[in-house]
Amino acid sequence: MRRKTEGLGDNASRVVAIVVACVVVACGDRTGGGSELACRSIEYIVGWGAGGGSDNFARAISPGVGEALGIPVKVINIPGGNAIPAMQQVLARPADGCTIFGISTDVVTNEAVGLTELSHEDLTPLIRAHVDVAMLLVDEEDRFDSWQDVLSYAKENPGDLLVGATGAAGYDEIALGILLESAGIAYRYIPYESGPSMHADLLGGRLDIAYEEISVIFSMIDAGQVKPVMVIAEQRVGRFPDVVSAGELGYEVPPLQWRGVAAHGETPPETARTLEQALLGAITSEGYRDFEMRRMLDLFPGVLASADFLPVLERDLKIFRDVVVRR
């Protein structure tokens, strides 16, 4: 049975109410930096390398968060291990709100496949910022002109197709497995620690096809370096009307990738609320909205406040656990 990818509703009135509270309560005092935060600065931990989707998101939202709280926000990359070492670092620090963690769907896939004993319950989810649609892409000058070309090659050369994505046994690999297995394709998976290294291998001919989010790869598409051959969604997306979707081909579409921010699970509620309000305020800022539109992160409703974000974590964990059992 194909699984629909629409996210939960963004509960717009609730989000607006929280953002208003941010303006009235937390964001108005620029000198105090938020009464619940005893921090000279905040460290924003990202479990992936520079230049990828999680890193780009962190650097786009951090200025607005710092402005709201009246203290600087420093992005720190701790790549490797599907962001598990980064999560360990966050949980080893005091639960005082001075460290926040950029999370993605990998938090629940790591848990689902048993890569770690850490759980999403060890974190306090603060916000979900967006969902990010992925594509399958080839080198513009490669032998493939369309998804049908890729499919024909894969059928004629079972197991020879080299498919790259970021992370091992994480969201990208599992999502690819769901998709390509439903397409009946045998392939070799090549994991990367960062998007740029994967992009270099694709352009260098060391990779046949790459799985990447539109927000990360759109500039290379516009530059004519890479060509999308499939969008991983139920329907085509407006910016790329000629690119076939997985759903229209009858393939199983995995849950969409999302990104958000969390804190230590033992963070005091008032501290977590201050962070949540600052993050929601930053997302509504003109600078972040411009980033979101330029990166096409507004294709699907994405913003969720903390109370509505937790059920998404629990829902996705169940979906991926079911996939692991099925496989």
Image: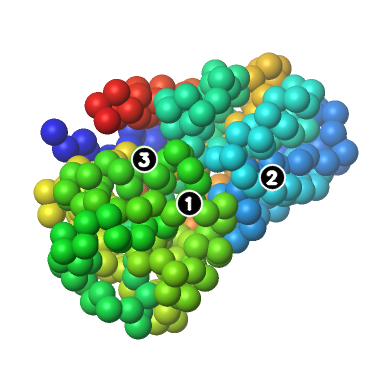
Residue 250, how many percent across, how many down?
12, 49
- Label 3 crowd (10 A; few <14 / some 14-19 / many >=20): many
- The reply, left or right, for residue 48 in relation to residue 12 is right
Residue 224, how many percent across, how many down?
39, 82
Please indicate, yes or no, whether residue 130 appears anywhere in the rendered image. yes
How many numbered circles does the render carry?
3
Q: Which numbered mark, 2 or 1, is in the foreground of this view?
A: 1
- The reply, left or right, for residue 146 in relation to residue 204 is left
Q: What amino acid does circle 2 point to? A: Ile
Q: What amino acid does circle 1 point to? A: Pro
Residue depicted at 45% across the width and 38% down the height: 169
The CA distance from mark 3 to mark 1 is: 12 Å
Comes first in the chain, label 2 or label 1:
2
Residue 21, how many percent across, how many down?
60, 31
Q: Which numbered mark, 3 or 1, is in the foreground of this view?
A: 1
Identify the secondary structure beneath mark 2.
loop
Comes first in the chain, label 3 or label 2:
2
What residue did someone put label 1 on? 191
Circle 2/circle 1 CB separation < 8 Å? no
Closer to the camera, 132 or 225?
225
Please indicate, yes or no, whether residue 274 appears anywhere in the rendered image. no
What residue did someone put label 2 on? 78
Identify the secondary structure beneath mark 3.
helix
Q: Name the quadrant containing residue 155.
A: bottom left
Q: What amino acid does circle 3 point to? A: Ile
What residue did someone put label 3 on? 174
- Label 2 crowd (10 A; few <14 / some 14-19 / many >=20): some
- Label 1 crowd (10 A; few <14 / some 14-19 / many >=20): some
